[in-house]
Image (cartoon, rainbow, N blue to C red):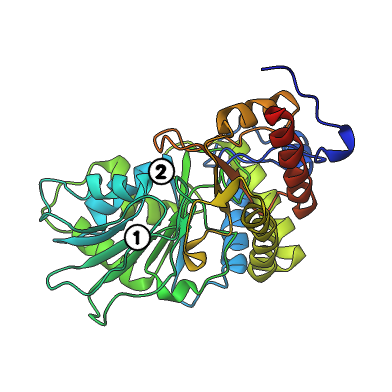
Amino acid sequence: MADVRIPTDLLPADGRFGCGPSKVRPEQVAALAAAGELLGTSHRQAPVKNLVGSVRNGLAELFRLPDGYEVVLGNGGSTAFWDVAAAGLIERRSAHLAFGEFGAKFVASARAPWLEAPHVVSSDPGSRGSLEPVDGVDVYAYPHNETSTGVSAPVTRIGSAPEALTVVDATSAAGGIDIDVSKTDAYYFAPQKNFAGDGGLWIALLSPAAIERAQRLDASDRFIPPFLSLTAAIDNSRLDQTLNTPAIGTLVMLDSQLQWMNSSGGLAWAGERTAESSGILYDWAQAHPLATPFVADPAHRSPVVVTIDLDDSVDAAAVAKTLRANGVVDTEPYRKLGRNQLRVATFVAIDPDDVRQLTRCLDYVIDALAD
């Protein structure tokens, strides 16, 4: 394959389109540099606790947090929260919607030996099913957005049983899709997607019912390892702390991103921005004779993670490799899907104009590789 040089007038101003870690704005890097004296200091003292408090307040503002809901932070990322939920939110049995890699991973955690076997509704990659009420279920769980496939689900409560909690994995959706948090009991995520931070931290927006459930299970005879204790995370968050030492740099970047998002118009603005960016890509894929959106149903398509299948006559790996050689990076598909595909993030930090330029790059590269 000959080297393909994309003309500079077609290139985006910023070529980062990865689904996580995601593009970090220069202003966040500047905030990190300005916080130099904060780095390497105790997270139990006022300067870092004030930073955690600012993050919690910023999230409460962004999500228009209902009365009684709390912003809780914990160590370990969203993958840790699956085990936290299995230990401290699921009482007997859960029901799951699994339409990709990450929804299935929560199911694996919910197969813990102290719980009844979960009820699971699975679907093929690129599609999603729906959850219906199930007798004996006390947690309904599903991803808001499946990062691996680019499929999104509406946020809604399942059934009317008052004791059942709605637990939503919002890792790649939070901050990029406008929602009503009151329709959930635990809306959890990590900062390396729309919030343009690093991983290793989980954040959960918890309802009073979820907090009560966690406290009740903690007071029962169930053994819960301290690291997986949701009540410990709740208690520490109320003090603007985390159980163990957090990555302070991540908190600085997250705080900067929250200030930018809230000052720009909040979650409604963010949702409009990601919808514009993703719409550019979906329109391109539908118009190009050698491309098609992987997610066939427009109602299931994600506004923050766009997956595009290329015709077999076009090597998607070669396209992504050529883009990378020209500074347009991280457009490769999720590794386990094994498709001739591109996957592009349209998170809030990514400028819609850069997405437009990306489509011009794609046109150029596909034509060049065909010659």
Dots 2 and 1: beta carbons under 8 Å? no
- Residue closest to the eye, 128 or 210: 128
Residue 182 location, x and y as percent?
44, 76
- To which residue does mark 2 refer? 243
- To which residue does mark 1 refer? 142
- Name the residue at 56% across, 29% down: 317
Residue 20 location, x and y as percent?
55, 40
Instruction: Determine whether 294 is above or below 303 in the image.
Output: above
Instruction: Determine whether 22 is above or below 277 in the image.
Output: above
Left or right for 348, reference 60: right
Instruction: Determine whether 336 is above or below 62 in the image.
Output: above
Q: Of callouts 2 and 1, which one flags the residue occurring earlier in the amino acid sequence?
A: 1
Compute the Cα span from label 2 to label 1. Answer: 26 Å
- Type of the residue with mark 2: Leu
Quarter occupied by the C terminus: top right
Left or right for 333, reference 34: left
Left or right for 273, reference 231: right
Residue 109 location, x and y as percent?
24, 45
